[in-house]
Amino acid sequence: MSESLWGYQPSSGHTAGADLSGYTVEATDGSIGKVDKHSDEAGSAYLLVDTGTWIFGKDVLLPAGTVRHIDTEDRKVYVDLTKEQVKDSPEFDRHRQTEDPGYQAQVSAYYLAFRIM
């Protein structure tokens, strides 16, 4: 179940290799920041979102499975999370690698609470 959290939903419109850096990220109730970095790696795809001043510069790691839709024309990524869910999410830990299974499990546990799979 957590594996599908770390892969883009087929309906998202994501194209492997597309550069999402700089895209605005939209929660279900408004903008939350911009994509700083992203990965398409199978089983560990994610977006690293810079929330800017909205939550005092906190960077958050959003598993690719939270992406609902990508609008390449408007350069926006829509996620199935509210602003509050993103605000309360684990802060990105630059000292732990995104490929670290323990770190990925910690992040997965938080987001799986909001997913119906």
Image: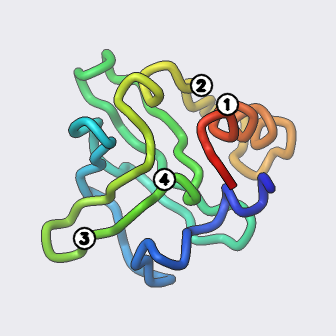
The amino acid marked with disc number 1 is Tyr
How far is disc 1 from disc 2 in space, using C-alphas? 8 Å
The amino acid marked with disc number 2 is Pro
The way the protein has been coloured in the rendering is: rainbow
The secondary element bearing badge 1 is classed as helix
The amino acid marked with disc number 4 is Leu
Which of pointers 4 and 1 lies earlier in the amino acid sequence? Answer: 4
Which quarter shows the C terminus? bottom right
Crowd class of label 3 (few under 14; some 14 to 19; many from 20; radius 10 Å) = some
Q: Determine whether label 1 and label 2 are within 8 Å by CB.
A: yes
Q: Position of residue 67 (x, y in %)?
A: 46, 58
Q: Which residue is mark 4?
A: 47
Q: Label for residue 110?
A: 1
Which of pointers 2 and 4 lies earlier in the amino acid sequence? Answer: 4
Would you identify the image quadrant in which residue 20 lies?
Answer: bottom left
Q: Which residue is mark 3?
A: 71
Which of pointers 3 and 2 lies earlier in the amino acid sequence? Answer: 3
The secondary element bearing badge 4 is classed as strand
